[in-house]
C-alpha cells in the first residue's frame, strides 16, 4: 500500500526547521499510520536533508501526525 493512497501531507518551514503533517483520508487508517510512520523512519527519510532530531506529535482526533524536523541543511522546504 502506498502511503499517498491513504493520506495527504502539508509542510511548512521556519529557517532550519520544517514541519510535516500527515493526515489520513479515512480514520480507520490512522492506527496503521501511527504504527508505521515513526519519528525514526521520518528521520531516515530526510537523512540527506536534515541533520537534527525529529519529533512526532499525534493528533488522533483529526487523524493526523505532525513531525518537526530540525537541522535542515540550507533551510527551507
Image: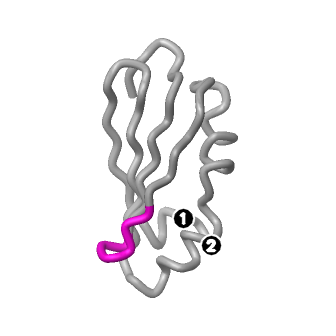
Q: Is residue 49 above or below residue 3?
A: above
Which quadrant of the figure has residue 14?
A: top left
Is 58 on the left or on the right of 36, as rendered?
left
Q: Which mark is residue 3?
A: 1
Q: Which mark is residue 33?
A: none
**Secondary structure state at the residue bearing disc 1:** helix
Residue 66 locus on image (x, y percent): 41, 53
Residue positioned 50% across, 29% down in the render? 70
Residue positioned 48% across, 63% down in the render? 4
Residue 28 locus on image (x, y percent): 45, 87
Is 50 on the left or on the right of 20, as rendered?
right
In front of the other: 57 or 7:
57
Residue positioned 69% across, 41% down in the render? 44
Residue 35 in magenta stretch: no
Residue at mark 2: 1
Q: Is residue 37 above or below residue 72?
A: below
**Secondary structure state at the residue bearing disc 2:** loop
Is 12 on the left or on the right of 2, as rendered?
left
Residue 21 locus on image (x, y percent): 38, 52
Total tally of numbered discs in the picture:
2
Residue positioned 50% across, 52% down in the render? 56
| Residues under numbered marks 2 and 1 in contact, where contact means CB atoms less than 8 Å apart | yes
In front of the other: 21 or 52:
52
Q: Residues within 10 Å of mark 2 (few under 14, many from 20)?
A: few
Magenta segment boundaries in residue numbering: 58-63
Q: Residues within 10 Å of mark 1 (few under 14, many from 20)?
A: few
Residue 40 locus on image (x, y percent): 67, 48
Amino acid at each position: 500500500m502506498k502511503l499517498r493512497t491513504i493520506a495527504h501531507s502539508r509542510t511548512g518551514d521556519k529557517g532550519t526547521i520544517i514541519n510535516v503533517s500527515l493526515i489520513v483520508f479515512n480514520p480507520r487508517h490512522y492506527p496503521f499510520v501511527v504504527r508505521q510512520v515513526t519519528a525514526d523512519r521520518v528521520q531516515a527519510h530526510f537523512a540527506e536533508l536534515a541533520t537534527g532530531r525529529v519529533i512526532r506529535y499525534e493528533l488522533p482526533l483529526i487523524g493526523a501526525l505532525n513531525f518537526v524536523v530540525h537541522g535542515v541543511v540550507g533551510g527551507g522546504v
